[in-house]
Image (cartoon, grey):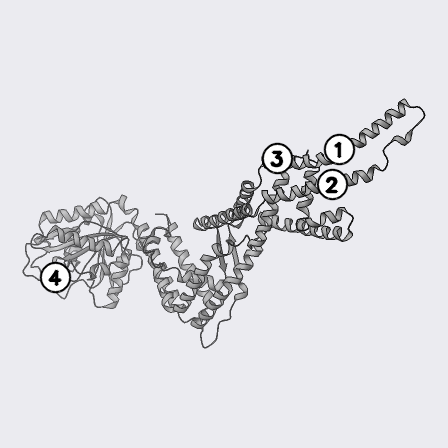
Amino acid sequence: MSHTPLETCRRLADDVERHAGVLGLEWEDHAAVLRMCEDFRRSCEEVAGNRGIDHVTIAFTGPKNSGKTRLLSLFVEGEDARRRLRVGYGRSDATEKVTWIGPRPPGDLREDCEAHILCSEEDLVDLGFPYTLVDVPGLNEADERRSDAAVRALDSSLVKVLVTARRELEDKALAHYLARADGSLILPVINFVRAEVPQEDLDEFQAMLRESLPHSEVRPPVLVGDAAIGGDDGQTKGGDESILPDDVERLRRAIRDAAGPRRLRDLPQARLNRKYRRFKDDVGRFMGERLPASRRALDALRETEEGLPGETLGHLLGSDRALRAGVRQRLRATLLQRTPYVFFPWRAFLALANLLHGAVERIPFALMGSIPAWVSGAFTAARNVKDARDFSRGVEGGVRGYVEGAVREKILPKVRDLEFVLNRELRSGGEEIPAAAGDLQVKISGLDNLQARSSEIFHSAVDRWAPSRAAATLTGLAGFLIFWGLFAWPVYGLYLDFFDAVRALWTDHSGASGSFPSAPFGMLGTSLLLALLPMGFFMLASVSLLVRPRRVTACLEQIRGGHSETVADLVRAGLLTIEVEQPRIDACLFLLKLAPQEGEGNRSDHTDSPKA
């Protein structure tokens, strides 16, 4: 068997001890937790090492006077060993000590409550594999010392033969007694059968054992009759000679089939799996009973912590006002990007309008030479550039600091509540254990993934709701035609006058230079202003139409919806988590969460057990 499951169990015990030490060595229940860890280690080592016995151990157990030793003797052929067995049947010489029958005793035999009967492999009935028999005192043993030894022997034995009488089939104490040995191979044997037992009773008995021992392999019951029964109390008049040969063979075959080497290779693993889970449950329940107020405060902290990703990261995009302004700016920027460069000066003034958003009405005054308009426009342009840069940084990344601050603000009150009740329940000698809120650390995982997906959602929404390339081209063409339709005529007239003057100069050698156009710049400036005004009004109308509030709202809703859905998906998949770390809180959380939470049942038996 691999030592990995055993090492995993040892690591669990070490972790429990370490976290219990973090809560405080002066804590009054600290010693009790250490004892639980030590018992768990010893028990796991005994199961993994089979108490030093290198082959199968088969324990016969059951109530007193159920005939355990009589059935066990059917597997012993050596006369000396058979004489030393105490077949009681209610007499004073019934089995009192845990008796090991085999070639060698366990490594840590306790002589006050355990005994060993030397019996070579040749003196045991051949089952096809080497084995050692264990005769365990009755489960209703009153002596505490012998009862503890019996529990320990059952715990380490790989196969349990549960012997009971017909009248005790409904006694649930049988399963309760074997509860600590859950994860074993259980072979029920119904002894002293005088008459036929209904199959329904056998099925109910087997179902009761399987329900009480869910991690054990419960084999079908074996019936053993007795022709020498003298009364209803189940006592017999003879020894094993009163057992019918067919019953003897049936019992031996049942053990041989159930306890084959191939099947037993997995039994220690199953036992360690169950011990691992049971130890976690015991420690978790023990801590929950000792720290009830801390458990409630911890549950409140965990509930707040579980809601942090959706609550904090869901509002990561900021307020509607800021996001709306950023979306509107991106839609206008996309309109500018999709406008062809040939549409001059439409594209240039569209860029200027984007830059001076919020101060567009000052453009005409600036064109007329107003110094305050120029200054105000410059300040507005600088502010818009800064806002655009900050918004881009928020969309693309750089939000970890904001998230950590928001998490601290929401989680700190719960942390202080937990520290208060934890200090109150752990205080020793009237002294409060100092709080350690300063050690609080916020650990965020999956934030980069969220940022990348949110950026994709943002760009996808902007691409969908921004003016199309065709709309940008058509409005650009219209603005281009408006401007040049008004500005081209004065230019055309100037060029006509210029070429007429040149022609007159070449044809009239008298040098009539006075025929060239006079004051052209004033005319061009006036014409430029007259052309820009209608183009500007058309620009305001077209941009207002293409980036209208309804389109901005739709884009904003898509971004927020996609972001919230992404956060929910990442949280559900466990790819986006926010954890609060602080040594004493972590120790408390580790110890209290060992017990299965409400609604979990035994699910964790298969998810966190040690693996080979």
Q: Amino acid at mark 4?
A: Tyr
User: Dot 4 corresponds to which residue?
Assistant: 89
Q: What is the spatial separation of the Cα atoms under label 4 and label 3, in whole angstroms?
A: 107 Å
Q: Amino acid at mark 1?
A: Trp
Q: Earlier in the sequence, mark 1 or mark 3?
A: 3
Q: Amino acid at mark 2?
A: Leu
Number of numbered tags placed on the structure image? 4
Q: Earlier in the sequence, mark 2 or mark 3?
A: 3
Image coordinates for residue 109, horizontal then vertical, percent: 29, 60
In the figure, residue 537 lies in which quadrant?
top right
User: Dot 3 corresponds to which residue?
Assistant: 474
User: Dot 1 corresponds to which residue?
Assistant: 489
Circle nearer the viewer, 2 or 3 = 2
Can residue 603 be seen in the rendering of this structure?
A: yes
Badge 1 marks a residue whose secondary structure is helix
Circle nearer the viewer, 1 or 3 = 1
